[in-house]
Each structure stands twice: as structure tokens, then as C-alpha cells.
Image (cartoon, rainbow, N blue to C red):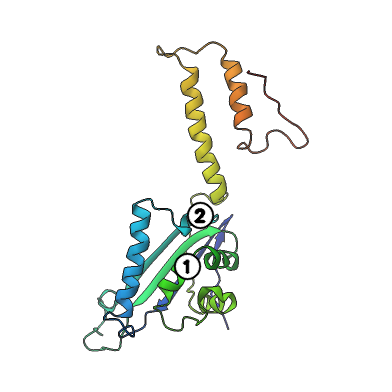
Amino acid sequence: MDWARSVSIGRATEVTLFTPIMPGLVPGEGRTYEQRLHSALESVQRRLLRHVPTPIGVMPTIHFARWLILRPAQYLQYSTITPDSAPSLRSWLFFESNFDGEVKDYLREFSVFLGEDVDRIWGNCEGWPAGGSRSFETYWDYAKRHQIPTHAFYAAYPDLSVGRIRQLQRFRRAFDAFVARTRQPDGSTVPDVAKLFDQFLSENIVYPNDFPAEGGSYVGEDVN
């Protein structure tokens, strides 16, 4: 099978999946598969907006992810075919994500960290494997069969992993706090700024790249 290939720029890679949503009602429920899918996606969004910890927030490689439901009235708006004239037409689930590393490793992380959410979402789509995302090889095959090619991909920080970006965020907060400690109310420098700088380096030595040099070390001045 001639599968679509993900595009990579530096560390960043993309994947786009396009899966048909099952028609009709969910057995034993008074709602359609599309309605159940919409409810599952809204649940994910509510958790994110309320800053409730979610599995997707702890995935170590994910930069960006988006799910959206494409309905016939949307994708046929410039077509002579209409949903009314072709009632068998269905809605589709569009998924797009940017991440660090290889697509297979990324989807494996999805099955580990987001298995239940993944099943709640794609379980409403045609052909979803009976074993769900936990049955990784069938899940991988399903994803690749529904991957569509990306023709243009842009990454703002192609050489920075998610882990590194988070490190730099923490470093920036620490540096802002350090600058505040070195300023007096009138804007002048506090005494012993060199001592404070050595303390800052010793507390934040895990963040800089290429410092100390390979084989070297840094031991801050004893500030106690």
C-alpha cells in the first residue's frame, strides 16, 4: 500500500488523518455517532479550557493537535452535489498534529497516554479496530490508511523540542526573578550582584546548552 508520508522540518513532524464518521444511531443510545463524537471532543476542550490536567498535557513530544468535524454542508458548499441530493454522504473527522520525532513513535505515545480518549473519539469512525488503540499494530495500520499528505508544512521552532521549549520557559521565569533581585527601587544595581549571578547559575545550570563545555564543570561560589 502506498501510504502518505509525514513531513519533517528539523525536529518537528506533522500528521493529518481524515476518517469517515459512522452514519446512523449508536446502538442503545438516542444519538448518532457524530453527536457522540461531538460530545467527546467537547469534553476534551472543556478540560483544556478549565486547566484540568489531561493525558494530552503530559505527552512529552506534542506541539499542537486539532480535531474537527467536517459536515457535508461545509465541504459541498461549492459543489453541485448537496447533502439533500446525496443523503448517503457522511461527515468526516479531521485530525492534525505537530510533534517531535517519528510518526509511529508519536502514535504509540497516543495509545499509551491517551488510549481511552483516542477510543472515545475514533471509536465513532468507520473501520476503527475492535481492540482500539491498545492493539497498536492494528491502530497503526488504521492511522496510516487514513493519513493524507501534507503539501506545505511550517514549524516556527524546528530545532526546539517540546521539552526544550518548556525548559526555556522555566529559565525565562527564573531569569526575570533574578533580574528583579539585582535591581534596587531606584533602578540601580544591588551590592554583590556577582554573588547573586553565581547563585543564579548554580541553581539553573541544567538549562543552558553547551555550558559547561564537555568535560568541564561549574561550581558556583558558596553563597551560604
**SS state under label 2:** helix
Q: Which numbered disc covers residue 58?
A: 2
Q: Which x, y percent locates residue 106?
A: 56, 64
In the image, residue 211 lies at what x, y percent? 68, 34
Rendered location of residue 177, percent (x, y): 48, 27
Quarter of the image that includes the N terminus: bottom right
Q: Residue at left 53%, top 50%?
A: 162
- Asked if residue 186 can be seen in this view, the reply is yes
Q: Residue at x 54, y 52 (%)?
A: 158
Kind of residue sitting beneath label 2: Val
Q: Is residue 176 above or below residue 186?
A: below
Find disc 1 in the rendering and name its residue: 151
Quadrant hosting residue 85: bottom left
Secondary structure type for disc 1: loop
> In the picture shown, does residue 31 fall above or below 95?
below
Do the CB atoms of the residues marked 1 and 2 lie less than 8 Å apart? no
Relative placement, left or right, of 192 versus 35 is right
